[in-house]
Image (spheres, rainbow, N blue to C red):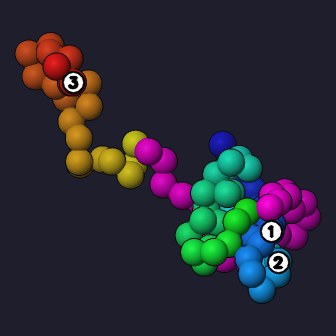
Amino acid sequence: MTLKTYDVTLRGPLGDRLVRVAAEIDVQAGDAAASLMAEDEAIVGIARVDGDPGAVQAGPPLSQAAEFAGETEGAAASDAGQPPFS
């Protein structure tokens, strides 16, 4: 998949603010924006930007596989054919 640019609207006690992020799909845009959010902010909108995207403030989040690489063996690395969670 290719990266797309999204404007994510965040709402907090001081009002709304817009952050621009790069992601493959809109759900990942919310994940990318989460790294820019203050504790008291919430995502209230996600819109794809067409045309010249300009500068983004956050890149795509890591996939779960990338996030946990090296922390868990997973089924492919389990020895003797045992299920990984036995």
Q: Secondary structure at mark 1?
A: strand
Magenta stretch: dominant secondary structure: loop
Q: Which residue is mark 3?
A: 85
Q: Which of the two discs, 2 and 1, sits closer to the camera?
A: 2
| Residue 74 in picture, x, y percent from top left | 26, 31
19 up-or-down from 60: above or below: below
Residue drawn 77% across the image and 65% down it = 8
Q: Secondary structure at mark 3?
A: loop
Instruction: Tell me if I can see residue 78 in this picture.
Output: yes
Neighbours of disc 2 within 10 Å: few (<14), some (14-19), many (20+):
few
Q: Which amino acid lies under the numbered mark 3 shown in the image of this protein? A: Phe
Q: Which residue is mark 2?
A: 16
Q: Which amino acid lies under the numbered mark 2 shown in the image of this protein? A: Asp
13 up-or-down from 8: above or below: below
22 up-or-down from 2: above or below: below
Q: Earlier in the sequence, mark 1 or mark 3?
A: 1
Asked if disc 2 and disc 1 are in contact, CB closer than 8 Å, the reply is: yes
Residue toward you, 75 or 39: 39
Horizontal arrangement in the rendering, residue 29 relative to residue 52 (left or right): left
Residue toward you, 44 or 49: 44
Residue at the outermost left position: 80
Residue drawn 8% across the image and 15% down it = 80
Is 55 magenta? The answer is yes
Horizontal arrangement in the rendering, residue 57 relative to residue 78 (left or right): right
- The quadrant the C terminus occupies is top left
Q: Which residue is mark 1?
A: 9
Horizontal arrangement in the rendering, residue 62 relative to residue 39 (left or right): left
- Residue range in magenta is 44-64
Instruction: Tell me if I can see residue 19 in this picture.
Output: no
Q: Which amino acid lies under the numbered mark 1 shown in the image of this protein? A: Thr
